[in-house]
Image (cartoon, rainbow, N blue to C red):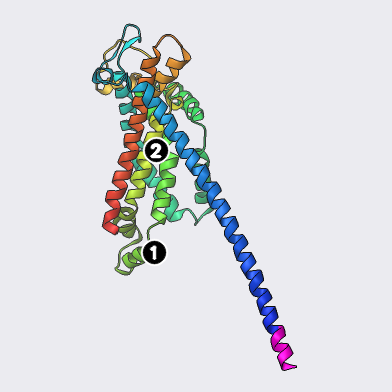
Amino acid sequence: MQTEATLTGIAQRSEWEQRAARRDAQRLRKNALLTTLFGGMGLLTTLLVFALIAVIAYKGAPTLSWEFLTQPPREGMSAGGVWPMIRGSLLLMLGTFLLATPLGIFGGVCLAEYGERSRIMRFMHASVAALAGTPPIVYGLFGLAIFVLKFHFGVSLLAGWCTLTLFSLPVIVLTTETALKTAPAALIDGGLALGLSRWQTLWRIALPYALSGILTGVILSLGRAAGEATPVLFTASIYYSTAQLTLGWETLRQPVANLPYYLAEGYRQPGVVPDHLIWGACLTLIMLVLLLNAGAIFIRSRTRRRYL
């Protein structure tokens, strides 16, 4: 009887082992299939992006020159360069950076510290997340209704700054909140144990640790704003002007040319601007955005070294 029970137990154990082996083999096949599927999708997406950049570079590189980058348009936009558009895009990004960065960081700090403590803060978090996915044209129409018409800024650089600030704020706020939440609890507890207040711990420990993520979010949001035409479509853009733009307080009340609006109008009015100028301006905008992204990667790598 004991021998039979032993044999029965061995047979059952062998059957269990076989079932476990079949289950493990099935899991491995499913894992390999999903890995191949998602890897192929990621590779296809990467190839499409590189193909797009390659086409733009192929058609825009012959136009790219020092004269093209530093000269204004001539002969009714049919010759010359795109320097006023580059200058206008840089001015829009500079003002957006100065306005959106402190507001976005402050909002992210508030959500990170108090976002889960009250219904109001949870509602604010949901609202910011919703605004981050709002179409850019909505910001353009809001800027037209509020800054251009209600506040009487007119179509000007100042109205464009305010509109792009609102457009960039949600991304900066959410990025700051996420970066602050990645700070190790041991660092925060250590600061509190040493007698620092909550705000001192945030200012001296959490913010320096999260600085790389915050700056990355700021620069990426600026790159996103630099490539959008619709937020400044009704608030700051001008297609062509022969007036000389001088930097001063009066500049804030004047519209500025910029690369996204130049591209949009160039394709909307075929034949007015030669195709090679459009492709050159498109490549210039791509290079500007890529430089911002490269700057974000460089800053992130430099600021992370102190905590490695």
Q: Is residue 238 visible?
A: no
- The residue lying at 29 percent from left, 58 percent from top is 307
Q: Residue furthest bottom?
A: 1
Q: Position of residue 286 (x, y in %)?
A: 37, 29
Q: Mark 2 sits on what residue?
A: 221
Q: CA distance from mark 2 to mark 1?
A: 28 Å
Does 160 sit above or below residue 294? above
Q: Which residues are magenta?
A: 1-8
Circles 2 and 1, Cβ within 8 Å, touching? The answer is no
Q: Mark 1 sits on what residue?
A: 185
What type is the residue that disc 2 sits on? Ser
Q: Horizontally, is 20 left or right of 307 in the view? A: right
Mark 1: few/some/many CA within 10 Å (<14, 14-19, 20+): few
Does 74 sit above or below residue 230? above
Mark 2: few/some/many CA within 10 Å (<14, 14-19, 20+): many
- The residue lying at 43 percent from left, 53 percent from top is 112
**Of 246 and 262, the residue lying toward us:** 262
**Of 189 and 291, the residue lying toward us:** 291
Task: Find out whether residue 2 is within the magenta segment.
Answer: yes
Secondary structure found at label 2 = helix
What type is the residue that disc 1 sits on? Ala
